[in-house]
Structures are given as C-alpha cells and as structure tokens.
C-alpha cells in the first residue's frame, strides 16, 4: 500500500509547468532561505493554478520525461518553490540533456547561494549548460536582506553578491531582482547596485508569483 501511494504521488507531482510560453521545472522543495514573502511559508504551494508541493526529489529522468520536446518552449526555467541548485547534479544533468535536445534558452532562477552551500565555485559548471541566470538580490543591503530572507547560513548576502560577480565573469547573462513593496527595500538603490555589479536589474511586484 505504501509503495502504491508513493508511486501515485510521483505520477501526480507537477515537475514541469507552462507559463507565458515558458516551461518551468520544479525539481526540489528544499530551500536555503526562509523568505517571509514566499507563499509556501504561508502554507500555499499553488502558483498560477499549479500545485508545486513535492513529497520526493525527482530524478533527472523523471524531469526530462515531464519536459518532453524542449524545442516547443521559448525558455526552460529551473524555478519552482525550492532552490534548484541544492540539487546541482540533477540540474546540470537535465540542463545538459535539454541543450543536446535543442532547447532554445535555459535559465536558472536562484537565490545565488550555490557556492556557499557547495563550498566551491560552481559557476563554471553552470556556464556550460545555462544561457542565463536570475538571482534574487532582494535588497540593497545586508540588514534588509536578512530581515526578509531569513537565511539559514551566515554570510548569505555577501556570498550571493560574490556568486553574481562570478557568474558574470563566466559569460552568463545575469539579472538580479528585487521586490517592490517589501518594507525597507529601496528599488532605485537595488538598480544602482546591479549597475555596479555589471548585471541587469528587474523589479518584481509583491505577491505576484509566476
């Protein structure tokens, strides 16, 4: 009975979901941060009608099966309601195969803490399989960042900025984002920080997910 239930959960899980002509890949439910504005910390796992709650960690083969033909999509994005780089090997394997199968553009949405978590610079590996990366800058300074993201590891803000710089030097197209509407977040200051980092900036709207 337990095995049957687990099989049903795997079959019913949303590993890939379509939005705006893009395909988003949901490969983990674990996170490095505990962002107060994240819907899952309010008990909400649904994004644009898709239930993204996972009770297992999907294999690369399961994710690729959920994608199907990658050439159908403008972009394929590693996203979901977890941090994709916590499953770095799976991410790299899936992205590499998608490129081989003709994916037009592969993007990673990340908190930028992969180097901190894995204790090495992983941006060279990411540069081999990704076209672009979107990093959650979140705030213009460490205090505001920590208040909203509640990182599990010390030094997260500095590590995120270092990751952005490293990814840029690898030739990856990098965009950093911040949410307009979060208390204390200065969007113009975030834009200026992005300019100093030499990357693009995109403002997001509070509570607009997906």
Image: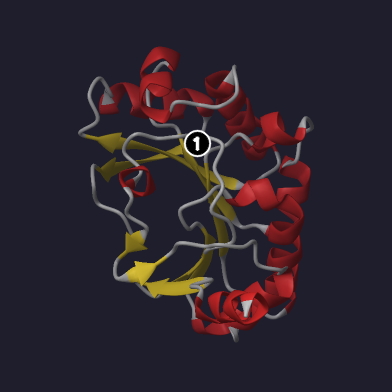
- From what the image shows, is residue 68 above or below residue 77? below
Question: Where in the figure is residue 43, as x and y percent of width and height?
Answer: 33, 50
Q: Residue at x 29, y 67 (%)?
A: 48
Position of residue 115 in the picture relative to residue 156 (left or right) = right
The residue drawn where x is 45% and y is 15% is 142
- Describe residue 65's horizontal placement relative to residue 20 as left or right: right
Q: How many marks?
A: 1
- Residue 172 percent location from the top left of the image: 63, 47
Q: Residue furthest top?
A: 143
Please give left or right for residue 22 compared with residue 181 in the image: right
Where's residue 41, x and y in %? 37, 43
Image position of 210 (left or right of 74): left
Q: Residue at x 36, y 70 (%)?
A: 50
Percent position of residue 120, x then y: 79, 32
Colour convention: secondary structure
Q: Nearer the viewer, residue 24 or 7?
A: 7
At 54% from the left edge and 71% from the top edge, which residue is drawn?
15
Q: Nearer the viewer, residue 171 or 17?
A: 17
Query: Toward the viewer: 1 or 91?
Result: 1
Secondary structure at badge 1 equals loop
Choose top left, top right, bottom left or bottom right for residue 71: bottom right
Classify mark 1: residues with Cα within 10 Å, few (<14), some (14-19) or many (20+).
some
The answer to whether residue 151 is above or below residue 83 is: above
The answer to whether any part of residue 70 appears in the image is: no
- The reply to whether residue 85 is visible in this rendering is yes
Q: Quadrant of the C terminus?
A: bottom left
In which quadrant will I find the N terminus? bottom right
Look at mark 1 in the image and give the residue it sits on. 199
């Amino acid at each position: 009975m337990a095995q049957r239930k687990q099989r049903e959960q795997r079959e019913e899980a949303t590993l890939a979901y379509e939005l705006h002509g893009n395909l988003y890949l949901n490969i983990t439910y674990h996170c490095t941060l505990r962002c107060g504005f994240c819907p899952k910390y309010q008990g909400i796992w649904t994004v644009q009608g898709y239930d993204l709650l996972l009770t297992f960690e999907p294999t690369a083969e399961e994710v690729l099966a959920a994608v199907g033909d990658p050439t159908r999509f403008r972009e394929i994005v590693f996203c979901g309601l977890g941090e994709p780089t916590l499953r770095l090997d799976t991410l790299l394997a899936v992205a590499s195969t998608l490129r081989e199968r003709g994916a037009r553009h592969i993007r990673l949405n990340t908190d930028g803490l992969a180097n901190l978590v894995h204790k090495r610079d992983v941006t060279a590996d990411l540069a081999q399989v990704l076209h672009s990366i979107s990093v959650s800058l979140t705030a213009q300074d460490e205090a505001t960042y920590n208040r909203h993201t509640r990182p599990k590891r010390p030094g997260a803000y500095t590590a995120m900025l270092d990751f952005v710089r490293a990814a840029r030097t690898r030739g990856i197209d990098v965009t950093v984002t911040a949410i307009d509407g979060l208390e204390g977040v200065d969007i113009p200051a975030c834009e200026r920080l992005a300019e100093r980092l030499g990357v693009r900036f995109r403002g997001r709207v509070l509570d607009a997910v997906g």
